[in-house]
Amino acid sequence: MTYQHNSTLPQDLLEQIAEQGFDYLPELIQTIVNAAMILERQKYLGVEPYERSSERRDQANGFKPKTVKTRVGDIQFAIPQVRGGNFYPQAMEKGMRSERALMVSLAEMYVQGVSTRKVSAIVEKMIGSSVSSAQVSKAAAQMDEILTQWRNRDLGEVRYLYLDARYEKVRIDGQVRDAAVLVALGVGPDGRRRVLGVSIALGEQEIHWRAFMESLVNRGLRGIELIISDDHAGLRAARRAVFGGIPWQRCQFHLQQNAQGYVPRKEMQHEVAEDIRTIFNAPHRAAAERYLAEMIQKYEQSASQLASWMEENIPEGLTFFSFPSTHRRKLRTSNGIERLNREIKRRTRVVGVFPSEVSCLRLISAVLMETSDEWEASNHPYLSFKGEKET
């Protein structure tokens, strides 16, 4: 099949953007990415168009249309084809990452309240043309609408639910406060991760965690088989109230850290850490419980508080043994969602103090939406549910 892709020159599009703002951004993305994909095919073939050469790897075979949903609307690309069928351009995925980065950058500028002059200078470097404050405001308003829809979307079935919180400095009622950013991450039946929700609260008290969890349920969250999180008191109480009866895996990394608070002498810290790792790395739960009993007995005399703490708390880190062996490494800790929180911090660091809770939620939502989109588009699922009955 033949496909007539847009041949408008990027310079013409840049002039249209200068006159009419971001309405022409989808066409700019389409033209640049299509041109990059053609160049990528040309390099793959190893020859110039219509050139005859013994070094030619394959023959060009037209274009195949593909529509991609982006935050600036649906964009139809022309994917270059070859007769052998062993070529697929990477420029489109890279282009979409650039598009997402553009929108997040606009959000960053918007929440910082930077001057029109600075916004124009930054955007000019990004797309080759300056824009007005009205155009920036329009782009920000469009982003607010998209992010609100994303935060309120239906969720459906999720097998594993990860919960965690981090803090950002936000100006509230004239005072700079540490606001809690509550985040939920899920793994669906297809094995792919996605960010389920985010909320800004004044702390991690039960009332805030409970409202957040209930909002996930109201959006259709169902099918949870395991919850993975730290043992914050507010989170624990809310989890029991909203998701009572669902198994819970306490983060082993945090358990290791918590244990050190019960070690009576510094020289014992390494030994205790190794003993706890032995429990967690056991081949099955029966062995882990046996090791735990041995460690409790070992420390009864030399560290009685540690022994009591281990007896009460370590079993909460052993729930993962009831799940498929191929999943256990990623169910043991909340490290995955904490890496996500570090990415949030990397993007919010430039802000310093957010002017409001709304501005904080806007930027963090943009970062999370970008990340979640990349996860769901990945060709490599986070987990595989084939043979999931294996334990």
Image: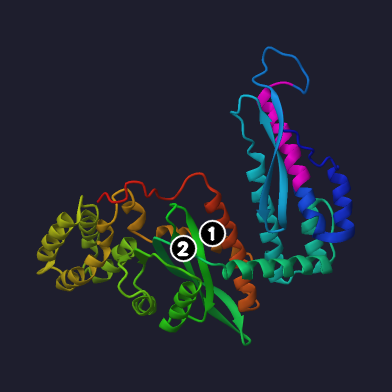
Of the residues shown, which amino acid type is indicated by label 2? Leu
Distance from the alpha carbon under mark 2 to that under mark 1:
14 Å
**109 drawn magenta:** no
- Side of 383 where 152 appears, left or right: right
- The tag on residue 13 is none
Name the colour scheme.
Answer: rainbow
Quadrant housing the N terminus:
top right
Q: Which residue is mark 1?
A: 343
User: What residue appears at the point 62 percent right and 68 percent down from the top-left corner?
Assistant: 149
Of the residues shown, which amino acid type is indicated by label 1? Glu
Residue 313 image position (x, y, % from top left): 23, 70
Q: Nearer the viewer, residue 151 or 280?
A: 151
Q: Nearer the viewer, residue 52 or 15?
A: 52
Task: Say whether residue 246 is visible.
Answer: yes
Q: Is residue 294 above or below residue 240?
A: above
Which of discs 2 and 1 lies nearer the camera? The answer is 2
Q: How many marks?
A: 2
**32 drawn magenta:** yes
Q: Is residue 168 above or below residue 367?
A: below
Residue 81 image position (x, y, % from top left): 67, 31
Magenta segment main secondary structure: helix
Counting residues from the start of the chain, the first of labels 2 and 1 encountered is: 2
Label 2 environment density (alpha carbons within 10 Å; few <14, some 14–19, many ≥20): many
Q: Could you say which quadrant of the image residue 355 lies in? A: bottom right
User: Residue pushed farthest front?
Assistant: 1
Residue 124 image position (x, y, % from top left): 81, 55
- The tag on residue 185 is 2
Read off the magenta span: 30-47
User: Residue pushed farthest bottom?
Assistant: 173
Which element is circle 2 on?
A: strand
